[in-house]
Amino acid sequence: MNTLWGNVFKNSKKDPQDVRDILKGVPIFEELSGKELFQIGRILHEREYQPDEAVFRQGDPGVGMYIIAEGVVEIRNDPSGQVLTKLEGGEFFGELSLLEDAPRTASAVTRTPCRLLCFFQPDLLDLINRHPRLGVKILFRLAKTIGERLRKTNECLSAAGPASGGEADGNIGR
């Protein structure tokens, strides 16, 4: 098989217990049973990244969320390069793309060697069709997590005060 065109997301390397332990620490999955975590683990995709490798770029289509099993990922605004946050093992990003088909609003770049678990929107939709109760649990926790992050962002923006020049320009995220 030509490795250039091989599947870069591999399911075969995952240790099921390791994946369940990681998922337990992710707010979206923390209230799921062991059996439910196993079901989620079966549909996750795993990929290893080298330092300074783009997971995705600002403007790319959003297709799913990423959970950091190992390593450090930097979320930044392009083209300014402003670092918005650095995330480490057990943290996650890109979850909004599970709900909407919109371009990425920031870039995610690895700072160290990373192992990421990827949960893609088509897999979530299939899970919802096959296991509606589990799907509802995940969607409810996903909505709660997104709401908490929005609230925290609003608090940070309020604490920062008006934009330079004394007036807020109303163009958040441009």
Image: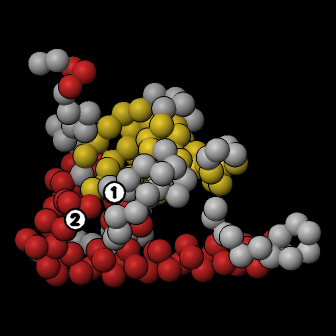
Left or right placement of residue 162 versus residue 53 in this view: right
Which image quarter is the N terminus in? top left
| Direction right: furthest residue | 165
Pointers 2 and 1 in contact (C-beta within 8 Å)? yes
- Whether residue 123 sits left or right of residue 57 in the image: it is left
The residue beneath circle 1 is: 64
Quadrant position of the C terminus in the picture: bottom right
Q: Earlier in the sequence, mark 2 or mark 1?
A: 1
- In the orientation shown, which residue stands out farthest toward the left? 130
User: Residue at point 13% right, 65% down?
Assistant: 126
- For label 2, the residue is 124
Label 2 and label 1: CA atoms lie apart by 9 Å
Q: From where the camera sits, is residue 22 visible?
A: no
Residue 98, placed above or below residue 78: below
Query: Looking at the picture, how far across and down is residue 66, in whole percent?
Result: 39, 52
In the rendering, at what x and y percent does residue 169 appear? Answer: 77, 73
Q: Quadrant of residue 34?
A: bottom left
Specify the amino acid type for callout 2. Answer: Leu
